[in-house]
């Protein structure tokens, strides 16, 4: 395959640069930039469409990069190191390899609903890093997918992609304009005999998370970082649960709250299967 060389800030370089900071142009192109060995590897392993691979024009690739360049049928770009460093957004020089990856469709059908369904919904998040962190937790705790609703930060923002550490490529993440599309999807699933409970999280919940049965098929709702759940979503909840807290903190960061609730759901499900202790236990948060 022919190699395209970029040695100046030409039109092609500027096009790639817009994938970092211009959400509108990312959306029009339906592609985004992926940085890091693990995220790129997971994108390939999980079958995402890699459109371009960008590497340093002045140094030989490592065995890992050489293998990807050889077996992935994508456009190959050899870039001047100073330009590659700009796209890498690293303080210590250029990444060895960057990938341009095509976005998956925002179809709720990508999320499989089954008898042990565990889904997560993030209502109007403002911080892309929180989206990526929640995707990472969802992956670690065996969730089936994440829905991002309303006027929200972009899951394909570089901050989100990095924070997910590659989990974006293994857990379906679907953007939905509002609660209406999600409820229509849930109504269809319920009509097929899949009784998914909509469970919101709020400091004034009806029960603590350890007192509520999270072994049933559930869609867990996490609210906006500042305002919490919207009025519409509050009205659509079948149940609202809270995370018991001590100390002076009035609430948890959205990604931390999601991790705690996902952990409790996972703990209950393992306990039901006879593979975990019944006593609730919350792990220390990891950075």
Image (tube, rainbow, N blue to C red):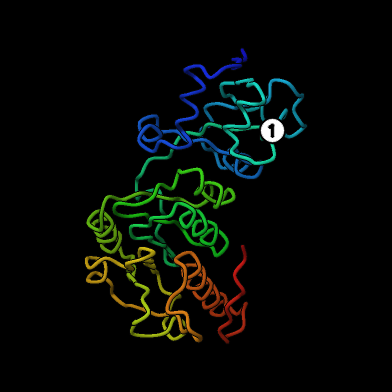
Q: Is residue 276 left or right of residue 177?
A: right
Q: Classify mark 1: helix, strand or loop.
A: loop
Q: Is residue 165 left or right of residue 219?
A: right
Give percent across and percent down for residue 235: 22, 71
Mark 1 lies on residue: 96
- The residue nearer to you, when weighing 36 against 179, is 36
Q: Quadrant of the N terminus?
A: top right
Give percent across and percent down for residue 237: 28, 72
- Residue at the far top in the pictured view: 2
Give percent across and percent down for residue 156: 45, 43
Query: Badge 1 local density, few (<14 within 10 Å), some, or many (20+)?
Result: many
Toward which corner of the image does residue 36 lie, by quadrant? top right
Q: Quadrant of the C terminus?
A: bottom right
- The residue nearer to you, when weighing 124 against 44, is 124
Question: Can the viewer see residue 219 in this picture?
Answer: no
Question: Can the viewer see residue 15 in this picture?
Answer: yes
């Amino acid at each position: 395959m022919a190699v395209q060389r970029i040695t100046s800030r030409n039109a092609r370089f500027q096009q790639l640069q817009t994938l970092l900071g211009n959400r509108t142009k990312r959306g029009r192109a339906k592609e985004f930039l992926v940085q890091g060995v693990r995220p790129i590897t997971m994108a390939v392993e999980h079958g995402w469409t890699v459109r371009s691979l960008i590497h340093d024009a002045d140094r030989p690739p490592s065995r890992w990069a050489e293998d990807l360049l050889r077996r992935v049928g994508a456009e190959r770009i050899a870039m001047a190191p100073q330009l590659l460093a700009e796209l890498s957004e690293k303080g210590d020089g250029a990444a060895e390899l960057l990938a341009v990856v095509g976005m998956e469709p925002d179809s709720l059908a990508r999320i499989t609903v089954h008898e042990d369904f565990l889904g997560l919904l993030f209502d109007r998040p403002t911080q892309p890093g929180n989206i990526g962190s929640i995707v990472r937790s969802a992956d670690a705790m065996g969730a089936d997918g994440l829905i991002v609703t309303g006027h929200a930060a972009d899951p394909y923002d570089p901050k989100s992609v990095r924070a997910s550490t590659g989990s974006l490529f293994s857990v379906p993440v679907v953007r939905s304009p509002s609660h209406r599309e999600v409820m229509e999807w849930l109504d269809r699933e319920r009509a097929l005999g899949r009784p998914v409970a909509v469970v919101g999280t709020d400091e004034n919940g009806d029960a603590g998370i350890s007192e509520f049965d999270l072994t049933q098929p559930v869609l867990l709702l996490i609210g906006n970082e500042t305002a919490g759940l919207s009025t519409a979503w509050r009205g659509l909840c079948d149940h609202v649960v809270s995370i018991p807290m001590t100390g002076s903190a009035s609430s948890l960061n959205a990604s931390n709250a999601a991790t705690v609730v996902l952990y409790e759901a996972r703990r209950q499900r393992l306990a039901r299967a006879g593979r975990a202790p019944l006593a609730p236990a919350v792990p220390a948060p990891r950075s």
